[in-house]
Image (spheres, grey):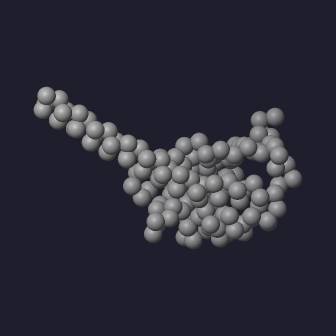
Amino acid sequence: MKKLALMFAVIGVIGISFGYKVIADEKENELVRVPLEKYLKGHATGDPEMIRQAFHKDARINAYRDGNLLNLSAEEFAGRFNGKAAPDESKRKRSIDLVEINGNAAIARITLDYPTVKFTDYMSLLKINGEWKIINKTFYADSKTAAK
């Protein structure tokens, strides 16, 4: 009887510990998505402030396009937003496709599917002073007009 009680106690402790980890993981997943959602909102509204809030001030944005390396600061990238939604906003789709967290580091993959181009963004994020921020964005732009 004592062995049975001990076994249930051990199973209970393991279950509680596992349940706590799942809850903690879910909470962290929600928190890491905050800057990603701000990033998406910045794209949807054209609001450069949303972009500034999503990225760490020292973040970099990188791509290789048309034979040239694009390397922007977060502020340069935010400066590309004019405060207005795009005229074809209703035809644009955005999604967070993947989030992976390990300690204070995370990665995310975002798709921005627009009428003439499909962007795939790879984000690196860090939790700095308790807040998740995008620290690096590397992206690929797949032109839909080139295929026509």
Q: Position of residue 89 (x, y in %)?
A: 82, 50
| Rendering quarter of residue 72 | bottom right
Nearest the eye: 17 or 100: 17
Q: Nearer the viewer, residue 34 or 56?
A: 34
Q: In this image, 83 relative to 26: left or right?
A: right
* Residue lying furthest left: 2
Describe residue 83's horizontal placement relative to residue 2 as left or right: right
**Quarter of image, res 17:** top left
The outermost residue toward the front is 1
Taking the view exactly as shown, the residue that stands out farthest to the right is 87
Residue at 81%, 57% (x, y): give it: 85
Q: Residue at x 61, y 62 (%)?
A: 54
Residue at 12% across, 32% down: 2
Q: Quadrant of the N terminus?
A: top left
Q: Horizontal placement of 11 versus 102: left or right?
A: left
Q: How many marks?
A: 0
x 79%, y 66%: residue: 82
Against 47, is 11 above or below? above
Counting from the top left corner in percent of width and height, residue 37 is at 63, 54
Q: Is residue 37 visible?
A: yes
Rendered-image quadrant of the C terminus = top right
Residue 69 shows in the view: no
Measured as percent of width and height from the top left, residue 111 is found at: 65, 44
Vertically, is 34 above or below 6? below
Give the x, y percent position of residue 65.
67, 52
Lateral position of residue 78 relative to residue 45, left or right: left
